[in-house]
Image (cartoon, grey):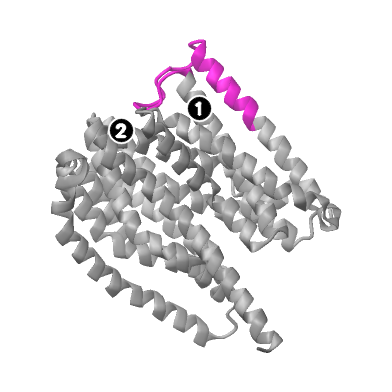
Amino acid sequence: MSSHSAAGLLRSRALLGTLVVQGLGSAATLLVGLLIAWFQGPEAQGHYGVLRATADLCLAIGLLGLPQSIVHLIQYEGVRPAALYACLRRYSLALLVLAVVLASSIYFGWMPARVSSSIQGSVAALAMAITVLGWIVQGMLRSFVLCLGSTRAFSWVTAAPSLTLLCCAMALMAAGSQRYEWALAGSGLLSVAWGTLAVRPLQAMVRWREGGDVRISSFVDAGGHAAVQVVMVTAQPFIALWFMQRGEATAAEIGWLVLAGYIQQAFVLPTSFAMPLVYARASNARGMETVTNLWRGIWVVGPFACVCAMAAAVVLPSLLTTIAKGAYAGALHACLWLVAAGPAAMMGRLAAVMLLGQGRFSLVSTSYSLRVAAMTILIPAWMWLGASGIAAGAAAGWAI
């Protein structure tokens, strides 16, 4: 075997390992929801779904596009990683102070003790603050690993929140508890520890101390579009659940909608394996032929996903009657609506990655914003139908 062939084989194996590890993280997120549905029923599922959607939205807002900014500043502007790391520590400290102030305000009665139907009291609010703060710090630490570490280390750090959450949630279920804010908090703490251990070897590198200083304006320029896109994506499930809570839906109905969302994620999960490849090829494309072939490949996904959606529609009625002794039978219509939107969700994610690889950031930000605006209008119009109506509004938003 020639040296070029051996190097290519090693690169292929490294890429395969990266895709497998990142796929494990996505599968772990899906598995948590399915385990809760199977063993604890729709009420627990609804409680967890609201907690997770709230944490994800707060995470997106708190990150402010900083991970993408860190990568851009290190790789393209030559900023000193040690200087960026110092900024990270100051920002994390400010967030910690804010979390303590908010929890104290709830404890002393200066703020409402009932943040939502699933976050009640200062202890629950503090647990959620720990979750969000931990995931924010982990999200920024993984950017340093991406720029200076190995591909394998980056993959494991990326999957850390999902894998640790799965372990914490399983421990909670084994104890017979439904206080999933503590499983989320455990994941936040473990994710920070994982990211810190991954960054520590990088701090001994010469590259860590080389480069220029940091300008605050550079963070805004590099991460603005990324922040908008992430917030718009995470706002979608939060908006649906928020309207359900305001519409006085029962915990079981919220659980039905959350399960429907997880079933839709089963369609989106395979795209997690393809997204790094699509982005890499789109960003390195030098001719229209490569770009055209990539778009053709994305369009091929549509018919395949439609076939899968029709198969799922046949299986779902019998499947839902077996989960939690038939407690999810009422979720059928919500599941069918979101399964119907599964092909659009798959193609939308791949198309967004393709456009990002081509540098068309404004177009992706605009499309995500329009989708959220459509959901905000359609969901209230149909929410009188309960979980199925809200699922129909969300599905229409995906189609738009």
In front of the other: 168 or 83: 168
Q: Which of the marked residues, 2 or 1, is nearer the chain's N terminus?
A: 2
Residue drawn at (46%, 83%) of the image? 292
Q: Is residue 207 magenta?
A: no
Q: Is residue 100 magenta?
A: yes
Q: Position of residue 254 (x, y in %)?
A: 26, 37
Residue drawn at (77%, 41%) of the image? 86
Query: Is residue 239 placed above or below 295 in the rendered structure?
Result: above
Q: Is residue 247 visible?
A: no
The residue at the far top in this view is 108
Badge 1 density bin: few <14, some 14–19, many ≥20, Cα 10 Å: many
Q: Is residue 50 left or right of residue 255?
A: right
Residue drawn at (56%, 54%) of the image? 226
Query: What's the magenta region?
Result: 95-122
Between the residue at mark 2 and the residue at mark 1, the CA separation in whole angstroms equals 17 Å
Q: Is residue 35 visible?
A: yes
Q: What amino acid type should be assigned to the residue bearing mark 1?
A: Ala
Query: Is residue 97 placed above or below 25 in the rendered structure?
Result: above
Q: Secondary structure at mark 2?
A: helix
Q: Position of residue 223 (x, y in %)?
A: 62, 53
Q: Position of residue 207 (x, y in %)?
A: 82, 58
Residue drawn at (34%, 77%) of the image? 300
Q: Position of residue 148 (x, y in %)?
A: 73, 59
The residue to which callout 1 is attached is 127
Q: Is residue 119 left or right of residue 212?
A: left
Q: What amino acid type should be assigned to the residue bearing mark 2?
A: Ala
The residue to which callout 2 is attached is 44
Screen quadrant of the C terminus: bottom left
Q: Residue 264 — which label?
A: none
Q: Quadrant of residue 6?
A: bottom right
In front of the other: 62 or 52: 52
In front of the other: 244 or 303: 303
